[in-house]
Image (tube, coloured by chain):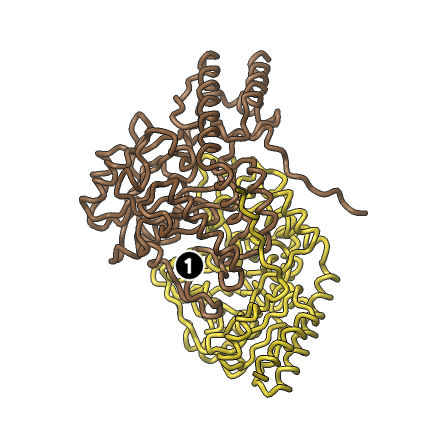
Chain colours: A brown, B yellow
Amino acid sequence: MRQPEPEPQSFDRVLSSMCTEPHPDARAAAERFLAANPGDPATYETVASLETRAVERLATLADHPTPPDAAGYVTSGGTEANVQAVRSARNRHGGCDVNVVAPASAHFSFTKAAELLDVELRTVPVGDDYRADLEAVAAAVDEATALVVGVAGSTEYGRVDPIPELAATAGEVGARVHVDAAWGGFVLPFTEHDWSFADAPVDTLTIDPHKFGQAPVPAGGLLAREDAALDALAVDTPYLESRSQATLTGTRSGAGVAGAVAAMDALWPEGYREAAERAADNADWLAAELADRGYEVVDPELPLIAAAVPESEFAALRDAGWKVSRTGTGELRVVCMPHVTRATLRAFLDDLDGIRRR
Amino acid sequence: MRQPEPEPQSFDRVLSSMCTEPHPDARAAAERFLAANPGDPATYETVASLETRAVERLATLADHPTPPDAAGYVTSGGTEANVQAVRSARNRHGGCDVNVVAPASAHFSFTKAAELLDVELRTVPVGDDYRADLEAVAAAVDEATALVVGVAGSTEYGRVDPIPELAATAGEVGARVHVDAAWGGFVLPFTEHDWSFADAPVDTLTIDPHKFGQAPVPAGGLLAREDAALDALAVDTPYLESRSQATLTGTRSGAGVAGAVAAMDALWPEGYREAAERAADNADWLAAELADRGYEVVDPELPLIAAAVPESEFAALRDAGWKVSRTGTGELRVVCMPHVTRATLRAFLDDLDGIRRR
């Protein structure tokens, strides 16, 4: 007897994810390109040309000085992009024993990168505002520092580090600068934050279509100011008609590339602006509602709320089917992605109120 | 005005790829799971349970001693699986300055892995039969050798290294053994070759559903005999409700996982047996046809043909729209994947004959 087809759970109660329901055009494009491999451009030419378009659009979002000629590619996600940025900086710095300086708020992919690439990760504290502490960064860098990492939309609190100041500190020791805007990149263009290639001498930048870009998984993005950043990653490819490969993976997802292009074609800039504003409104509203109930709430700078909800209530919310997660210090974390509507948040608060009354 | 939707080229003339048209069930499953992320199992529980099924099925194919408990995961492809095998061996070996010994026929992902992971890659020659030269391997290994790589289905000639003998050599110096069956893994169970966990003390193995497994991209596979191989890769994941992550990437493709399960459910074992036999017949037939025309042909051991076709004829075939590629020494390479039918190969030979008559 045939088993019933497994179905993915709906996004109705997903408040913990930085991925979201893809835009319908992006889903359709991904379905068409499920069997194409941008890692083999001499065989799969159409998807290779789509990747060129994806990079140009991402570069436009991130204020690259020359979007049509920007170096970059569609990665499997933010982790690959961050790993590759560290690898590129390591390879370009020269010398053994290089180090990377990153705030404690940096994503765990930098821990992974350091372990993988055998570089020292110097993690420096954040200030009371959850942003990189500039004095601590200045004290941590030295001539062996290949890279200083700034986060533009941190995973736990949605904070944007002072990128221009971090870049100045990096510049003093000849280190390169990487901005991790994996999650924030599609929201930041509609804010006043300094984060992009235009705002500071940023060398490389992570910006993921499959997060706020509303592309299907897997579609991350790595951009570089100079071609040399990618050249430093290239290995020869003997049996492919292309000559070298700078990506971390080999075969890559055509669905991700085609989906990213379709999402950006459909949504840049007005659709993304509307989504960002709606998300910000929802985050502000939820923060106020939680504060009204007496919870300590970390003010949402980007659309992400952290609130000190007791362990027992957190567990009850999970039991009620809410996909929520916690920061390292145990606060409830809600990411207001495009699929998270005001109605969803009302239902969430209704359940929370019920739990509190028990 | 709306641009026409870009369409992927069909597989009609693709003879160079190790990917193929997915099985219809696999395509349907992938479409359902385009927005799920097995990298976040506490949020996306359904796809996480599908991944457990995928690993069990892959472990069954590769004769793992205990498939339901096999360590492994669905990677982005063979490159990730190979990189992770090298990383695991490096981390488990201890000491600095470890080396990896691989035959010259090993995939370029081992070059990538060595550069990335900062380990020495000792490439040893292959013999006249295109297989790892055992004496050369024995001469290359030493106490700093963390891993000996054997290829079970090489990219250029489809050859299977003598895995039990390589494992014995590795055992003498305490090195671990990795088998790269990325492409061969779904064909080898229907041959007499020694390649699997049952045939030798293999530690880790690469086997990709998105190649001969007829799953959509991206779906590779890494398997390990012992949990410790994966434990050696784990980093903490502070903000996910799961505790640690052993994968190279972070967010991963739900489409790949769901597609891999659906393909294996539909095709293992009889569908894969039929596909393997059909591919072998086609490869033998094409080899004979090319030999009849006077080309020097490398005898196909697995369904992959290499033939010394002059550069001008190769270029004319590419101009005619045939996606073909070349080995490092310039031979035409045709991979008889499931989408490559006898009719396709007849059309290819007709075009080749036309080019020769010019």
In depth, the one of B330 and A328 nearer the eye is: B330
Residue at 46% in and 58% down: B83
Residue located beneath label 1 in the image = B90
Left or right of A279? Residue A132 is left
Q: How far across and how far down the image is residue B134, in percent?
A: 49, 78
Secondary element under disc 1, as helix, strand or loop, is helix
Q: Is residue A61 left or right of residue B256?
A: left
The front one of B96 and A102 is A102
- On the image, the x and y values in percent for residue A336 come to 49, 28
Using the image, determine if residue B5 lies above or below residue B104: above
Which residue is located at x 63 percent, y 39 percent? Answer: B46
Can residue B167 be seen? no
Residue B263, position in %: x, y?
A: 68, 54
Res B146 quadrant in image: bottom left
The amino acid marked with disc number 1 is Arg
Label 1 chain ID: B
The residue lying toward the viewer, choosing from B78 and B167, is B78
Can you see residue A249? yes
